[in-house]
Image (spheres, rainbow, N blue to C red):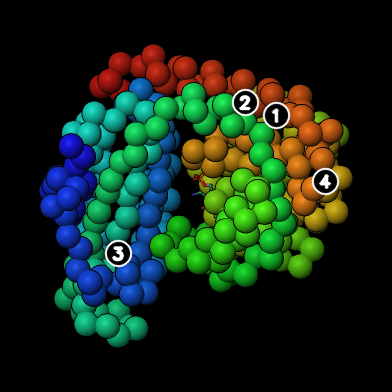
Amino acid sequence: MSFVLYQDQFIERNQAKVDIEDRGYQFGDGIYEAMIVYSSHIFLLEPHMKRLERSAHELNLNLPYSMDHLTRNIKRLVEINHLTDGIVYFQITRGAAPRQHYFPENTSSVVTGSVVHKERSAAQGTRGIKAVLADDIRWLRCDIKTLNLLGNVLAKQKAHEEGAGEAILHREDTVTEGSSSNVFIVQNGELVTHPADHFILNGITRLFVLDLARRLTIPVHERTFTIDELMNADEVFITGTSNEVNPVLEINGHLINGGTPGSIERKLIEAFNAEVEWIRALPQTQA
Ligand code: PMP
């Protein structure tokens, strides 16, 4: 039996209902976070919650409970579903109201959450993907993690139709990010990734990998880079909650690093794995 979070309650999934006029459905008017769970520990929970709070603030969306309360309920959702490895999905919409574009008055936000059980070893087996390039047709506030994902969905569909695992987005000549990931290139042993501005989502995994790189004394440059730099990079990889660090071995049919993961990627993956093992070994109370 699977339980979902609805506002402040845990309900059997097949009993849960949301209003047909919820603004999440009608306008994509809401925010979300997806977090990964390793051995019942929610990985990087605190920065995810900080980003959620920021997204709410940027959209003037009222949080119906305190951040502490929301965080407790997310942990409880993991427990009640006996989730050891997988994903917790959490969203807040501006709530249900008769359809009109401007914000409704006296409507409370709607919180929902659910989990997906997924073994990590399965994800590791798929290390290394093909990617395609796609125009970044999204709005100019990609830094906010909103439910409006059509630009991302269309790009991912293009990748899927072309047998690729990710679409790498670009605005004219500048590479921004993946349809559901951040993009890094390696040039002469140094990392380059788009700066955290309004053109990209500042990925929690991106920040974690930047930190890992600094610890490994790999130089890092947060600056824009071109399609040409991408195609000629020594290594290209994406980061994301479920992808972790995933090498991009081919882009639009062009092989990167001869189609095999490079040495910087291998170092980062190794460091990432060590972190996951460390988290797995923590007692449950330190989730
Ligand atoms: N960019 C976009 C557009 C995404 O959807 C995601 C996945 N949420 C990311 C980057 C990676 O973010 P994170 O590392 O927080 O999962």
Residue 46 percent coordinates (x, y): 38, 39
Q: Is residue 81 left or right of residue 144?
A: left
Q: Secondary structure at mark 1?
A: helix
Q: Amino acid at mark 4?
A: His
Q: Which residue is mark 3?
A: 93
Q: Quadrant of the N terminus?
A: top left
Residue 127 rendering spot, x and y as whole percentages: 62, 31
Q: Residues within 10 Å of mark 3 (few under 14, many from 20)?
A: many
Q: Residues within 10 Å of mark 4 (few under 14, many from 20)?
A: some
Residue displayed at 35% across by 22% down: 39
**Does the image show residue 197?**
no
Residue 269 is marked as: 2
Instruction: Tally the marks.
Output: 4
| Front position among marks 2 and 4 | 4
User: Which residue is labeled 4 in the image?
Assistant: 254
Q: Viewer-proximal residue, 221 or 132?
A: 132
Label ID, residue 265: 1
User: Would you identify the image quadrant in which residue 16 lies?
Assistant: bottom left
The three-letter code of the residue at mark 2 reads Ile
The answer to which of marks 2 and 4 sits earlier in the sequence is 4
Query: Which of disc 1 and disc 3 is earlier in sequence?
Result: 3
172 vs 227: above or below = below
Q: Earlier in the sequence, mark 4 or mark 1?
A: 4
Q: For the point 16% across and 76% down, which residue is it?
A: 106
The three-letter code of the residue at mark 1 reads Glu
Sooner in the amino-acid sequence: mark 3 or mark 2: 3
The reply to whether discs 2 and 1 touch (Cβ–Cβ < 8 Å) is yes
Look at the numbered disc 2 and say if its residue's Cβ is closer than 8 Å to ligand 1: no
Q: Are marks 2 and 4 in contact (CB under 8 Å)?
A: no
